Image: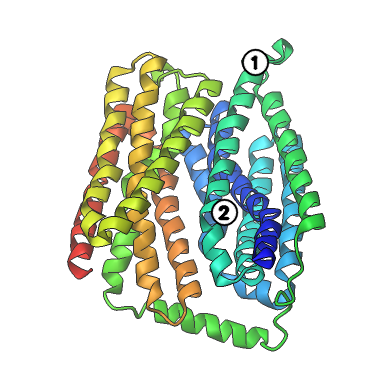
């Protein structure tokens, strides 16, 4: 018993910080960058295109995951990527005030994205090597919680700090200095991530099972990958599976890219003129907490009655709240009316998204290549967000916010068809 508690206590030293470190660069690239580019004056069309392109590393990461097994230990990859990400954050901080900031920050954010995707591969592999099956089950909720806390820290606290700085509420001299404020935020992010990397250098264990896979060559690994890739697309009802995976969040993929810019934009442009610091509080903090609560309740619900029972209610909970943004765009209410709308929409998203993730697990669990198939499934999931998200800004600029959100609601229709068809096969 003492040995078991000792092992759990030892794992507590690194699992929370490891998954906080996994979530922080992800949210910096996919969420914080959206608000930063909006503050720095990029059009919605350019912003959504650039930030959607930054999703590419997470889409294609299964392509180089065998190299992580072949060329080094998972611990080596984790520490190397964490230090590289810290350097990338510093480079972004220095690039923001430059006249060529768009190109420079995009390059460094893309490098951050590739480093983060590689870190994900190594961290998840290390988790399975350093812990036995019982310990993995025990810590799964903890790792997910700290990943979400990284979302709150990045999308909420960091955005609030950036807003408070350039709004002059912390240092009055920085009022109106948007670029300087965001540069300061990324320097703070550099410091935080450097401390995390230093901490992991000292405390991350060295399990004997974490070693180079020297028994298998690159050619064999590549052949194995091709085999697992082909076997995924030979699954029964694969076209229905792909239809579901690519359309379930078709509306949300577009709404998520424009929600923060809509809140930030001027009233005369159809936005709500909410301050950056308030967006960090409403969308990045309260919204993420609602998202987390929805996900937890969704998991509890499915555990009680099963995926088939909850599939239709969950697709409704995911998509119906999108109508609230149509109401906000039409009404353009004062800021204190906005929070309940955002919280309800994010709660519904969290609750409904649970069905998507469990469906992904369901289609992979019967395979002989569970881990590899799940990685391919998550890549398709990232693709389902990146493609619609990349054109969302252009659509919004052509139609305006009101009709854009009407369009988003229409884009939820394919997800209802896909869900009904999938439910018949469960």
Camera-nearest residue between 198 and 88: 198
372 relative to 397 in the view: left or right: right
Q: Quadrant of residue 310?
A: bottom left
Under circle 2, the secondary element is: helix
Kindly report the distance in space between the C-alpha atoms of the residues bearing marks 1 and 2. Answer: 38 Å
Residue 405 lies, in percent from the top left, at 30, 34
Identify which residue is drawn at 31% across, 30% down. Answer: 325
Identify which residue is drawn at 38% across, 37% down. Answer: 346
Q: Quadrant of residue 180?
A: top right
Residue 160 lies, in percent from the top left, at 59, 25
Residue 124 lies, in percent from the top left, at 60, 64
Which residue matches tag 1? Answer: 176
Instruction: Please say if 243 is above or below 415.
Output: below
Residue 249 appears in the picture as rendered: no
Q: Please tell me whether mark 1 or mark 2 is closer to you in this view.
A: 2
N-terminal of the pair, mark 1 or mark 2, is: 2
Instruction: Please say if 77 is above or below 141.
Output: below
The quarter of the image holding the N terminus is bottom right
12 relative to 271 in the view: left or right: right
Residue 66 lies, in percent from the top left, at 62, 75
Camera-nearest residue between 274 and 404: 274
Residue at the extreme top of the image, as rendered: 172
Which residue matches tag 2? Answer: 143
* Neighbours of disc 1 within 10 Å: few (<14), some (14-19), many (20+): some
Q: Which mark is residue 260?
A: none
Q: Quadrant of residue 9?
A: bottom right
């Amino acid at each position: 018993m003492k040995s078991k508690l000792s092992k759990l206590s030892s794992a507590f030293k690194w699992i929370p910080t490891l998954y906080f470190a996994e979530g922080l660069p992800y949210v910096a690239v996919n969420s914080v960058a959206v608000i930063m580019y909006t503050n720095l004056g990029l059009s919605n069309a350019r912003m959504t295109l650039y930030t959607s392109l930054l999703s590419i590393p997470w889409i294609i990461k299964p392509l180089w995951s065998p190299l992580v097994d072949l060329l080094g230990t998972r611990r080596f990859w984790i520490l190397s990527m964490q230090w590289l990400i810290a350097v990338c954050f510093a480079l972004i901080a220095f690039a923001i005030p430059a006249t060529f900031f768009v190109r420079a920050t995009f390059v460094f954010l893309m490098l951050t994205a590739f480093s983060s995707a590689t870190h994900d591969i190594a961290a998840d592999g290390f988790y399975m090597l350093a812990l036995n099956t019982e310990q993995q089950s025990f810590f799964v909720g903890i790792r997910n919680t700290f990943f979400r806390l990284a979302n709150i820290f990045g999308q909420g606290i960091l955005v609030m700090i950036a807003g408070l700085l350039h709004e002059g509420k912390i240092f009055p001299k920085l009022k109106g200095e948007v670029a300087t404020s965001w540069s300061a935020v990324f320097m703070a992010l550099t410091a935080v991530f450097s401390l995390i990397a230093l901490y992991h250098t000292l405390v991350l264990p060295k399990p004997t099972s974490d070693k180079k896979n020297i028994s298998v060559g690159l050619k064999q690994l590549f052949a194995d990958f091709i085999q697992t890739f082909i076997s995924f697309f030979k699954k029964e009802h694969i076209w229905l599976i792909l239809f579901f995976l690519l359309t379930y969040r078709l509306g949300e993929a577009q709404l998520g890219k424009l929600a923060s810019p809509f809140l930030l934009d001027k009233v005369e442009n159809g936005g709500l003129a909410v301050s950056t610091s308030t967006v960090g509080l409403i969308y990045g903090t309260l919204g993420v907490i609602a998202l987390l609560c929805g996900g937890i309740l969704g998991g509890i619900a499915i555990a009680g009655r099963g995926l088939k029972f909850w599939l239709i209610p969950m697709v409704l909970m995911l998509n119906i709240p999108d109508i609230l943004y149509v109401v906000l765009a039409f009404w353009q209410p004062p800021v204190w009316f906005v929070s309940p709308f955002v919280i309800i929409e994010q709660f519904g998203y969290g609750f409904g998204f649970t069905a998507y993730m469990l469906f992904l697990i369901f289609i992979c669990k019967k395979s002989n290549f569970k881990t590899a198939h799940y990685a391919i499934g998550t890549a398709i999931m990232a693709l389902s967000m990146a493609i619609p998200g990349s054109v969302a800004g252009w659509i919004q600029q052509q139609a305006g916010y009101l009709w854009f959100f009407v369009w988003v609601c229409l884009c939820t229709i394919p997800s209802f068809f896909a869900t009904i068809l999938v439910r018949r096969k469960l």
